[in-house]
Image (cartoon, coloured by chain):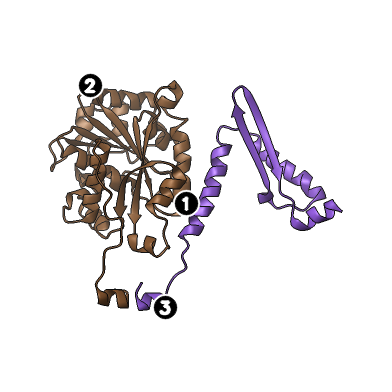
Amino acid sequence: MTEIIVVTSGKGGVGKTTTSASLACGIARRGKKVAVIDFDIGLRNLDLIMGCERRVVYDFVNVIQGECTLKQALIKDKRIETLFVLAASQTRDKDALSPEGVRRVLDELIADNFDYIICDSPAGIEKGAHLAMYFADRAVVVVNPEVSSVRDSDRILGLLASKTQRAEKGGAAVKEHLLLTRYNPRRVTAGEMMSVADVKDILGLDVVGVIPESQDVLSASNAGTPVILNADSDVSQAYDDAVSRLLGDTVPLRFVDEPKKGFLARMFGG
Amino acid sequence: MGLLAFFRRTPATASVAKERLRIIVAQERSARGSPDYMPMLRRELLEVIRKYVNVDPEAIQINFEKDGGNEVLEFSVALPQKAAAAAAV
């Protein structure tokens, strides 16, 4: 049984690709067979975050247009046996993606016994974003605790409830999960940033993960190593918790409280 | 909160953000699935009302609800304080 998960947000720059890469790695290293697909046609980026940009020969659009086989286009990860990347096309126009073409690729992955297919959605609500979510069973909605990101996410929730195959067929709805990124507990305590509870309240979704704001994310993208693989980082542990929850485990939220400070640090704002 | 932080404290704006989002998200959710002419209807109603009373665009609430087989268009205008007093006279 293959599960298709879209990672989406509406707003750009909130961490969709970082999240797609880390969730894909996290699920795959637990022994599941995972494909992660970049739907951002024209602006390929997942390959860079995954660190396989020099190994891209064929892409998603090549497969859809029959210029290569899916096997030729899937890039096997060098770190995790069961992880595969399908890169976005860089040069073609975004009309190259069609619902039938996407369906065909997904069906082929399903026939090839993939356990999970992660669809990394582009920003916005145009065709690429629409197709990334259209066939999804579940959605991870990536949100920054910031007004424009929260509002855009709510638009996306509206689309998930109306413009997906599940919505159109009238069966079970797409299961939606909230994943907060760039969370800064210090600023939340100071009342400068909305809390997990605030965002949860507004959007009415269950929280699958809270990722703390961290310099490790930039370091990871610089290196082309998904941040979840940096075991020392809080971000990595937070993503791994999110993976556990996606796979059905109940684990407590971590990194949502301000770290305790010593006396001097408290006096001088450390 | 440290001493230094106390003196350069930034205002606590998170609650403002939450309140603004709560309102706009509720409004946008209620607009979902409603007819496409709603924004136009809203604008024209506002123009008509403004011929008589100077109301704020925010003062007009339009709700479109589906209740079983019935579709209900609910419409409310909050008059400004002065105009309400004048109207009462």
Please identify, in this view, whether the residue under mark 2 or under mark 3 is nearer the observer. Answer: 3
Q: Quadrant of residue B38?
A: top right
Task: Tell me the chain of label 1.
Answer: A
Q: Are marks 2 and 3 on the same chain?
A: no
Give the chain letter for brown: A
Q: Are marks 3 and 1 on the same chain?
A: no
As drawn, the label of residue B7 is: 3
Instruction: Please name the residue that numbered disc 2 is placed on.
Output: A111
Query: Residue shown at 35%/30% (left/top)?
Result: A136
Q: Nearer the viewer, residue A54 or A103?
A: A103
Task: Tell me the chain of label 2.
Answer: A
The local crowd at label 2, few if under 14, some if 14 to 19, many if 20 or more residues have their Cα within 10 Å, is few
The N terminus of chain A - image quarter: top left
The C terminus of chain A - image quarter: bottom left
Give the chain letter for purple: B
Q: Is residue A212 above or below residue A2?
A: below
Of labels 1 and 2, earlier in sequence is 2
Instruction: Please name the residue that numbered disc 1 is placed on.
Output: A148
- Position of residue A234 measured from the top left corner of the image (x, y, whole percent): 22, 55
Q: Identify residue type, mark 3.
A: Phe
Query: Residue shown at 81%/56% (left/top)?
Result: B85
| Total numbered circles | 3
Q: Quadrant of residue A250?
A: top left
Task: Tell me the chain of label 3.
Answer: B
- Position of residue A197 measured from the top left corner of the image (x, y, whole percent): 40, 50
- Position of residue A22 measured from the top left corner of the image (x, y, whole percent): 24, 45
Q: Is residue A57 above or below residue B79?
A: above
Report, in whole angstroms, how far the alpha carbon at label 3 lies from the one at label 1. Answer: 29 Å
Query: Residue shown at 20%/25% (left/top)?
Result: A113
